[in-house]
Image: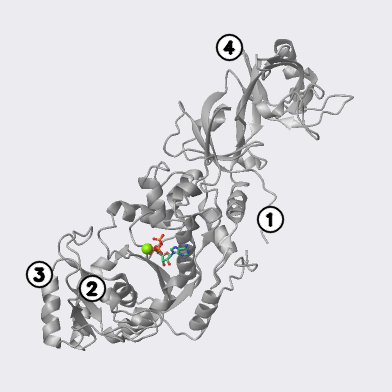
Amino acid sequence: MSEQSSTIEQKNDFIRNMIREDVSAQKYQQIVTRFPPEPNGYLHLGHVKAICLNFGVAKEFDGVCNLRFDDTNPTAEKQDYIDNIKNDVKWLGFKWAGEALYTSSYFDQLYASAVKLIKQGDAYVDLQSPEQIKESRGSFNEAGTASPHRDASVEENLQLFADMKNGKYAEGKAILRAKIDMASPNMNMRDPVIYRVMHQVHHQTGDKWCIYPMYDFAHPLSDAIEGITHSLCTLEFEDHRPFYDWAVEKVGFAQPPHQYEFSRLNVDHTMTSKRKLKQLVDENIVSGWDDPRMPTIAGMRRRGYTPEGLRDFCERVGVTKVDSVVDFRLLEFSIRQSLDNTTARGMAVLKPLKVTITNFDEAVKDWESLKAEGVKARWDEELQTLWLVQPNHPNVDMGEREIPFTKDLYIDQGDYEIEPPAGYKRLSPEKNEIRLRNTYVLAVTEHVLDDAGKVIELKATIDPTTLGQNPEGRKVKGVIHWVSASQGIPATVRLYEQLFSVEDPSSVSDVHEALNPNSLTELAAVVEPSLVNAPAGTRFQFEREGYFISDEQEHSTEQPVFNQIVSLRDSYKPA
Ligand code: ATP
Ligand code: MG
């Protein structure tokens, strides 16, 4: 948790402090940042941090943030990923400057830059095999050796590069390399590859190109082309910065972008790598990129996480250069916090146990005499139902709903124990009275067992004088929730645990061994009608159970489906 910032309001991280200095020194006309995903998968929790930082900084300093697809590897990329990435950024609450941008729209300019480098004697075509090239790079302790093609003439190189572009070479037969220093202690400076042959159709440029720039060449130049002032990326690119600076300078940009590196977001029991998440999708370990257990933005959205909660989480995590692993309970804390004041309450019984109220008919006859005490209700003769009017939330601005109260109810199986553990506060043969939330006090008179000795039904009575008021002469402790058996609606409720039981799933070579077999539990629940009538994608607090959302894709009024967002509370407190 060392990465957590205690100065949420001030946002005094090293990047913002630096930008603050640049702003007060009037170093730039405007702050320009960018979020540069490669469209080779769906965005995940790690990207949320990068998005909040880049877009957040731009907003705070009256600048702009570009969304740029770093699309230099057509084999792994797809239009579907592009569409979903755009959707995810918007959903998180951010707006990019103008249209979305693509590295591929700079391919002409990047090609011209490569030609310029060749003309300057700063790049050459290497015709060695990939194995030879790899071998001649040397190692940490050992300088690399020069390629026999390193000193070919400019004319020769221009011809070879044109030949590459014109399709004369098969993949792996020719590459363009920067000519820097084969003895550099930084391996990235040992004549890195800047263009390669790939006979691939590109999702944006079609079949125009059969050579594609390497990420390390395209990335800094794209930043420079866009006039990015602060190029923010994760620490693993620190060693690449010398090459980025080299490329930008050699190509001749007047005001080069500055790259600043921050630590990646790592969260325990979570995997943040598109490639590894793709494996879960491809092997049907999850139902898709948007499976609610996935740490993708699409998955977290379907799970019911809120953009506010995710942004709050990123603020709490802060931005540093120290690698650390964040406790997933901090994420849950932020999500929970964003839900409390915004979600309507409702009652849902996840593991139903039937209760028959034997004195229902006589008891409810009197409800009207209680109207004076502020009870709002309506008797429905046809359905033999007392419709109780209750607020949706302690904040009365959130409106009211009608809850059906009937002779047959469901309560949760966990609220009646034949042999209760010590300290148990709900129903048992010894403690037979309890308040039913929003309605009468109930007293159990009998439990019915099946052959295996399991309780399958309770018979009970209600105290007619307790609707909306306390009984006289005794204190009834405890409140439980319930749902009408006849008017309640069967619903599928999905409970979630971590997708991975292992704390660091990336450390396990076989992902199957890291999986939590209990990550998904589906229950046949019964819920009050107000919960199913709201549109799919509505979040609720199920009283005493947690926060839930009606599933964006599968929920319907006829077949309700709810996903658990997060539990109601946790002993965890952020530092
Ligand atoms: P992945 O390995 O999942 O594909 P990536 O870094 O290759 O991640 P990109 O699409 O290239 O994915 O990332 C876009 C931006 O998001 C980059 O600037 C990258 O530094 C940032 N980013 C990716 N993962 C994280 C993370 N875990 N924490 C913070 N930023 C991240
Ligand atoms: Mg990547």
What residue sits right under mark 2 in the picture?
A: 195
Q: Choose mark 4 or mark 2, whichever is in front.
A: 2
Q: Which label's residue is closer to the chain start, 3 or 4? A: 3
- Residue 248: image quadrant is bottom left
Report the mark closest to the observer, 1 or 4: 1
Residue type (three-letter) at the residue carrying disc 4: Glu
Q: Position of residue 102 (x, y in %)?
A: 29, 65
Q: CA distance from mark 4 to mark 2?
A: 78 Å
User: Measured along the vertical axis of the image, is residue 134 above or below residue 385?
Assistant: below
Checking the image for residue 374, the label placed there is none
Label 2: element kind: strand
Task: Return the x and y of residue 522 as percentages of the image width and height.
Answer: 52, 33
Mark 4 lies on a secondary structure that is loop
| Observer able to see residue 244 | no
Residue tagged by mark 4?
Answer: 382
Asked if the residue at tag 2 contacts the one at tag 3, i.e. Cβ–Cβ closer than 8 Å, the answer is: no
Kind of residue at badge 1: Lys
